[in-house]
Amino acid sequence: MPYPDHTQKAIAKCWTMPSSSSFCTYETLLFSDGTTSCNCPAWTRRVTVAGGRSCKHTRMVDMGIADGAATSFMDYSVFNAAQQQQPERKDNNAKTKDGTTDTTSVGKFKRRIV
C-alpha cells in the first residue's frame, strides 16, 4: 500500500512535542484538510489494519490539548489565509468594451498602444 503524499498539503499548524522517554523532540503537523502527521517512531512504524496512523502526539492534536503539551507551536493557517486572499492583478493592457487597448504608463510617459 503506498504511503500518503503529504508534500502537496498545506500545513495549518505545527507543534514541537517532547519525548516522554528520551531527550528527543518530535514535530506534529495538522494539515489544512484536518489530517495529522508526526515524525515520532510510534506514528512512522505503526499502521492500523484500515491503513491509518496514530500516536499520542496526533491524539493530543485531535483532542485539542496539544498547545499545552508542546514546547512550541506555529500557526500557519494565518499565512495560508493571506495567500488565498491576495488581490487580483489588474492587466494594464486590457481591452476596453469597444475593442481598443487602454492607455498604459511606461516609465514616466503615457502612450496609447494600438
Image: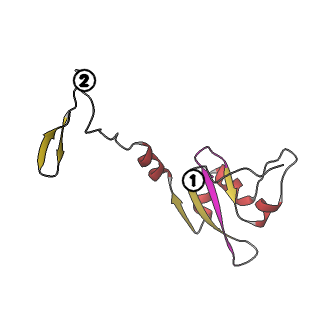
Residue 25 falls within the magenta-colored stretch: yes
Residue under the point 63% across and 45% down: 34
Image quarter where the C terminus lies is: top left
Which numbered disc covers residue 48? Answer: none
The boundaries of the magenta stretch are: 23-35
Q: Residues within 10 Å of mark 2 (few under 14, many from 20)?
A: few
Q: Quadrant of residue 72?
A: bottom right
Image coordinates of residue 82 in percent, x first then y, are: 41, 48
Mark 1 to mark 2 CA distance (whole Å): 44 Å
Between marks 1 and 2 in the image, the one whose residue lies nearer the viewer: 2
Count of picture labels: 2
Q: Which residue is mark 1?
A: 11
Please give left or right for residue 45 compared with residue 90 in the image.
right
Question: From the viewer's perspective, is residue 67 above or below residue 49?
Answer: below
Q: Is residue 31 left or right of residue 59?
A: left
Q: Which residue is found at the position 24% from the left and 26% from the top?
A: 96
Q: Secondary structure at mark 1?
A: strand
Q: Quick check: 101 above or below 34?
A: above
Residue type (three-letter) at the residue carrying disc 1: Ile
Q: Amino acid at mark 2?
A: Gly
Q: Is residue 79 left or right of residue 15?
A: left
Residue 45 point in image, percent of width and height: 82, 61
> Is residue 57 visible from the viewing direction of this image?
yes
Q: Earlier in the sequence, mark 1 or mark 2?
A: 1
> Where on the picture, by quarter, is residue 65?
bottom right
Extreme bottom residue here? 23
